Image: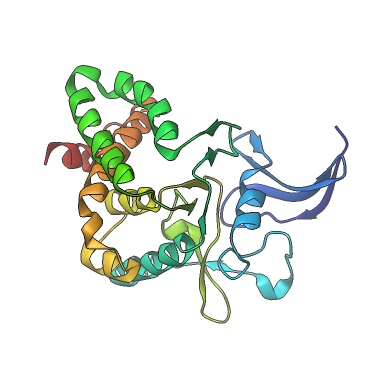
Amino acid sequence: MNEQIIEDLSSPWSGNTVHLVTVDGSQLIKKQYRKKEGYLREVHALRTVPQAICPSLVDAYEQLTYEPLQKNIQAADLDEIIGSLLRELHQHTVQKPSVFDPGNGVTKETWLDYLESFAPNWLQTIGTEKYESMYWSAINSVRAAYDRNQRALCLIHRDARLANVGEGSDGRFLFLDFELAIIGDPLWDVARYLIQSVHSETTFLKAYEFDHTEIEVLQAYKKLYAMSFMNYLIKNKQADTLDFKKCVNVLTN
């Protein structure tokens, strides 16, 4: 493989090493984090959403630099900012229902197929006997929504939080990191933020312009996301954290 670095796009605050490279004649984004390397996620996102939504990692001119939001930003402001950013991101839907994961190369016919492929692993980790019936209840609620009408898929961020939002010199807010981006159901992003990061659910959902006729689907996604996140936390020895308690709370209330 013939690789040549064109430009260093690493951000000083993320700890990631990011290069614009050519590999055998193709231009790619190469990212290294915790000794793991990946080529596809960021450039996949850049090809999927307009420049106005995703700051360009390719055209890294000085006037396109973005600073991370300050940690002392008001909680309500953060909920409104991220709600608005997710709404804007999710408006760019795709027509085909198939899901491609650029991180591992997995392709599934539908978003539900993609989720269900991970379920046995989640349940084995968090406790099949305790959570299996709840899993099937949640996944069947989502399936029923798909049966009623085909849901539009779009690029979902899967890591919307303070650390991944930047502010430009013009005062515009943008998502900075698409390392986990994938084509999927937008309510997965909404459920994730509600569990992990939200301060005011009302403020966030208003900024997102959430359609409350979908509340049943959202509640089901919250349970599914809680299971997937508990699996991650247990495997990373973080079962004593506040995030884990939030997941348990979602599944027990």
Q: Is residue 81 left or right of residue 221?
A: right
Q: What residue is drawn where x is 60% and y is 53%?
A: 45
Residue farthest bottom in this picture? 170
Decide which of 243, 39 is in the foreground and name it: 39
Front one among 30 and 91: 91
Residue furthest to the front: 148
Q: Residue 125: where, in percent of width, then height?
A: 32, 21
Question: Whole-percent x and y of residue 185?
Answer: 41, 48
Q: Position of residue 50 (x, y in %)?
A: 61, 65
**Which image quarter: residue 34?**
top right
Q: Residue furthest left?
A: 253
Q: Quadrant of the C terminus?
A: top left
Q: Residue at x 59, y 48 (%)?
A: 15
Foreground residue among 236 and 154: 154
Q: Quadrant of the N terminus?
A: top right
Which residue is pictured at 68% across the width and 59% down the height?
57
136 relative to 161, above or below: above
Q: Is residue 252 left or right of residue 241?
A: left
Question: Is residue 8 in view from this perspective?
Answer: yes
Q: Residue at x 63, y 49 (%)?
A: 44
